Image (tube, rainbow, N blue to C red):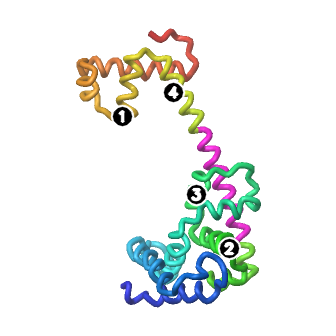
Amino acid sequence: MITKYKYLLEDTANKIKGNIGKGRFKNSDYEDLVYLGSFGLLEAIDRYPHDKNVEFKTYAATRILLSIVDIKNIYYELKNNISNDLKIDEIKDDIFSMALKEIPTKERIVLILYYCQNITLKEVSIIMNMSKSELSKFCKKSINDLRKKYKILYIRNLEYKKKKEKIVKALKKLPNKCRTILELYYIDNLSLKEISEKMELSKSEVSTIHKKAIIDLKNILNNNKKHIK
């Protein structure tokens, strides 16, 4: 199957080599581009969604192109180049890379090509088989989608950190034995039997303390004034 679709590798490599006069692929050999793209072809063969209404040729061509541009690990470069257009005050690297991975593949490719390869909109349009006007609109949509996805993940990350801080503070208010059992069970992933052996308690004692610790922790988190013993 690789031999059958080798022409897709060659076609993509030719498009990139022939239309990019500047940027990160300027000094890349044709053979290098074919080699990088081969990972995408293998992935396409392995992950092709037979139940979806999409031609393998179209799916594979996209994966090949993504493999070539993504394998260069350009998340930080894209973040720096696109930051003004994103209109986000603070861009965190880990959240940005997650957001970029969650937007559609075609949008990711367009943003990477346009913002990281120092090539013109016309050159990108040739590579993506789109008209300049189509590509311009698509590029704006891609930026908007990335911005929305980033903000959603940013808020979710803040909420997670707040909850984590609240739980850590609540844990410190528990009696030592209760706190230790919860930490061993939920953080160290020990079983109740393993905890009982480690703490030299019976399994039933550990189970009872564990249940009480959960109730006490919930009371603390809910600002319940019930005394914690």
How far is the residue under mark 1 from the one under mark 4? 15 Å
Left/right of residue 195 with respect to residue 153 in the rendered view: left
For this view, does 120 lie left or right of residue 210?
Answer: right
Q: Which mark is residue 114?
A: 2
Query: Of helix, strand and loop, which one carries label 1?
Result: loop
Q: Specify the label residue 109 is tagged with.
A: none
Which structural element holds mark 4?
helix
Q: Is residue 182 magenta?
A: no
Tell me the residue that label 4 is attached to: 168
Circle 4 residues within 10 Å: few <14, some 14–19, many ≥20: few
Around disc 3, counting alpha carbons within 10 Å, would you say few (fewer than 14), some (14 to 19), or many (20 or more)?
some
The part of the image, by quadrant, that contains residue 24 is bottom right
Q: Which residue is mark 1?
A: 188
> Spatial distance from mark 4 to mark 3, Cα to Cα?
28 Å
In the image, residue 172 sits, relative to residue 69, either above or below, namely: above
Q: Which residue sits at x=76%, y=80%? A: 133
